[in-house]
Image (tube, rainbow, N blue to C red):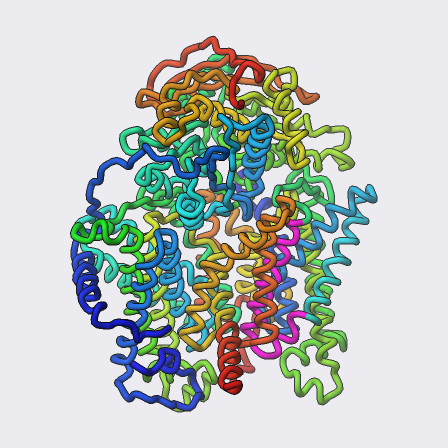
Amino acid sequence: MRTTTNTARRGPLAALLALALAATGCTGAGEVAETDGPDLSVSPGVTDDAVVIGTHQPLTGPAAAGYMSISRGAAAVFDHVNEQGGIHGRLIDYRVEDDGYDPARTIDVTRELVIEDEIFAMFGGLGTPTHGGVIDYLNDEGVPDVFPASGALAWNNTEEHPLTYGWQVDYTKEAKIQGQYIVENFPGQDVGYLFQNDDVGEDSQEGLDQYLTDEVVTRQHYESEVTDLSAQVAELKRSGAEVVVCSCIPAFVALAMLEAASTGYDPQWVVSSIGGDTATLQGLLSAFTEDTDAEGVPADTFLDGMLITSYMPRVEDPDDEWAAFFIDLYEEYGEGDPMTNTHIFGMTQAVMFAQVLMSAGPELDRQALVDALEEQEWQGPGSVPFSSSGGDHGGHQGAYVVQYREGGAVEMIQGPRVTDRDGGPIEEVDFTPLSPQELVFHD
Amino acid sequence: MSTSATEREPRTAGGPARRRVDLPSPLRHLLLAALALAAVAGLLLVTGDLTALRLAAVGYTMLAVAGLQLLVGGSGQVSLGHGAFMMIGAYTMALLVLRLPMLPLAGNLVAVVAVATVAGVAVGAATARLHGPYLAGATLILAVGLPGLTHRYHEVLGGSNGLTVRTAGAPPFLQGLVSGSEWKALVVWTAVVLGLAVLATVSTGRLGRRMRAVRDDETAAAMSGIPVGATKVTAFVVASAAGGLAGGLQVYVLGTATPSMFTLSLSLTLLAALVLGGIGSMWGALWAALAVVYLEIWLSDAVRAFELGKDVENNLPIVLFGVLLILVLRFQPLGLHGILQRLRALLRRAR
Amino acid sequence: MDHFVDLTLGGLASGAVYAALALSLVIIYQATRLVNFAQPALALVAVYTAATVAPLTGSYWLGFAAALTAGTAAGALVERFVVRPIARVSRLNGIIVTLGLLLVAQGGVGMVWGNDQHGFRYAFDFVGRPSPADVFALASVAAVAVLLFCLYRHTPLGLRMRAAALHPEAARLSGVRAGLMLTAGWAISALIASLAGMLAGPPFISPNVFDAVFVYGITAAVVGGLDNPFGAVVGGLLVGLGMSYVSGYAGPELATLTALALVVLVLSVRPDGILSRPAARKV
């Protein structure tokens, strides 16, 4: 470090800075000045033959296990899109940054994506605590924040975050549909809750409690850092709950099922979309049935009869056009790992993003993308209506219900229904997505 | 100014005191601090927002590591729970900004240091009797247990999603000249260099000598009239205050505090970085902070340059970090600072 | 009352696992005076070896044997070639190097097997409370504790290992091959860590699977006292039971705080753990 540069010129600057530092030290730290909205008529990351988009995902660390497949699925779809010639002649350059599910790192990699990689848009940033830390920044900088991956209610707040567009059905909507389904189909039965102790559990209970009241005999929660559910499952069993609603991620659904099996407890499981990935569950549970003392009990017995709310095509249903399309696509462009509904999550997101990029037209800037999002008439691949306009950035508006059957198939037992996240009614809708051939999402 | 900064670094115990300038130590450290601040300000002027964020991260990480250095290198108490104090500082800061937005930043930071000090007194007093692995175990479980509080009191502390705050950026008359991030980096470094000056003063003063005496031989220290328990607790408290301030500054920059930011791996990373950087010198803390902030970024970029499978690409940076740690310690027990010193000695001889 | 029994049995089952890890920590501490962060790394090597060998050979127990062998070998090699030259210079550096090893192992496992979770079966049937798997865990931990106690108190090898750890110079003068004793200590410890991994791994393994278990293992070792293998067992069961009761009666978010409270309580009364002898070597 050489310090012999022009000190005379530094003098006034230093004085100014010192003054300003003193001023910062003395004004309210939480008093933030209002600023004008950012300029959207720009198109960083866009060239004639490419568009750069970015995302933050946990690829290492404890959370990686459940979520790595999402960006793999999305990457496979973008590879396919690029193979077909891209979108308006532009190839999608999808940059995945690892944040290890640590919000401090999310902030760092997000800045790196925005400043260094000059991404055109943030796509599918994963996690509530992680993405929650960058949502202000993205909106301040005018970076479209498209389809964050979690069901938090916070993504749908157009007043504060006009550039954020939710995607996943929010936990409350989904839980309302679960609650109504239970009341209608298991009248008079005792219900127990098992939920993750964060906004997943909080928002889910809000929805469930609109329909379930006296039926609820116990509410158990778990912390994602503590992988022991014996106390909770023992209490569920003791309370005599005949139906258990599990607002949990797959690892904890599997744990709960193992724990229940080990204590001889066999309730009707109702699982949210986040945990109801039977392909992942089977992978986890198969070790406990092959060649063990529980021989002759295939993994399916754990899962048989499980009720799942869902809003996407499902990998268990290869007769579905989109599911079949995704399975073939992943065969060709994937990493060779077994395909799960978590992959489909990322693939559905990617197709919808590609679709809106298509609609935005060849003259691409951020305003065009936002306009396209606001005007898009969504027709799949998601299996329920989708909202991204008119002050409602809530994404998928509802869910359908499937039941898993031994042997690996799922059966739709209640068609798509939509609702809001407050006290509004649940309504049946008639919704059929366009087929993969009809839906335009690449050149 | 002809004296280079490196020659004025605080000396470790045992080294001959070859001071060229006989300024009283607090003044000398403040002067150095001003120099460091000028250097950072200069760096900020020529770089962008991303570097500003990372420089700020280097700043608060360095402060946390320097505090740990005083504790581990100075007094010989190995704490595996330094992240807990960063967490205390971070949540204090976030709550203050949320609940008392009109409170000036300086006031917030003073309050953060005060809270962390109180926490340090409590923990330090409870652990003063523990030695070696028992202290390590107790502080380890502190780092793991403390985030549990955010779940228990999630109405106040926000559960796993934590607290999100917005802090004021550059004052109005500087808008357009410096960006919000650059401004915050500058504020962070101002606080950091002040904190470092205090740490350096403590370390070179009477307390520092007492700490080293306790570290080298508790019994001998006690026999020569040093209050062993009080010295250990004081070291713990000073380190906690530095950690707390670092956490508070982190929230000021990042605007969010969640339990997942303060996991055990943070505490372990701080300790590993301290040893990697070089224990026993403030410069070590700087190399440590640079390693924490930049090494993984560089390693990831380097790994990405090769076409590797996804599993390899994701995990290789972690492996390389571990290998580097092992190799440095294998061949240079004084870490990166030791390597640099050796290089300098070689250069000097070549001249 | 039923609930109490459930919680007790659940707590004992997880306590056994913590005890196993605590035992391996006690051994290594006895042999080298190090807190070894590479312990979960050795356990990782073991379980992933088992997860690979068992399906190949079709036998869980061949996988089990391979796991213990691989873990033990890894422990001995790492001590001889990585840890010893570094720990000789500085004990703190020795601890940090074990952290580096943990990173290498976690990253390495992720590179080879991926970061996703894999199902990993129990040694015995897991159905029932207590299940055969629980009983196996408790019994093997008890057996290991007894064997270790005998090794240390009643065999020349144990005596030499303690001597090499406490007073390496004096031990060397009286003809003990101190280096060999260090390696032996690590090998035994790695063997127990591998066993602990096989007990703690199920139901699902991933590169970070042992992080939490290891923390409670250290907690157990510190609570029980690092000088006595039975201390590790007592500590492990205490931590397991405490966390289970608090989770069940007050809420699982308090589980980690319980471990913290336990450490504070025990160490404020007995700074060297429950089953330690009064520190005679202090002066």
Quarter location, residue A424:
top left
A160 left or right, relative to A400 = left
Comparing A1 with A426, the one in front is: A1
Residue drawn at the location 52% of the way across and 25% of the way down: A351
For residue C102: magenta? yes
Q: Is residue A272 visible?
A: no
Q: Is residue A141 visible?
A: yes
Q: How many marks?
A: 0
Which image quadrant: the N terminus of chain A?
A: bottom left
Quarter location, residue B45:
bottom left
Q: Which residues are magenta?
A: C82-111
Residue drawn at the location 63% of the way across and 47% of the way down: B307
Q: Is residue C10 above or below residue B241?
A: above
A395 left or right, relative to A342 = left
Q: Estimate the x, y position of residue C9 in percent, counting from the top left.
A: 60, 45
Q: Is residue B26 above or below residue B163?
A: below
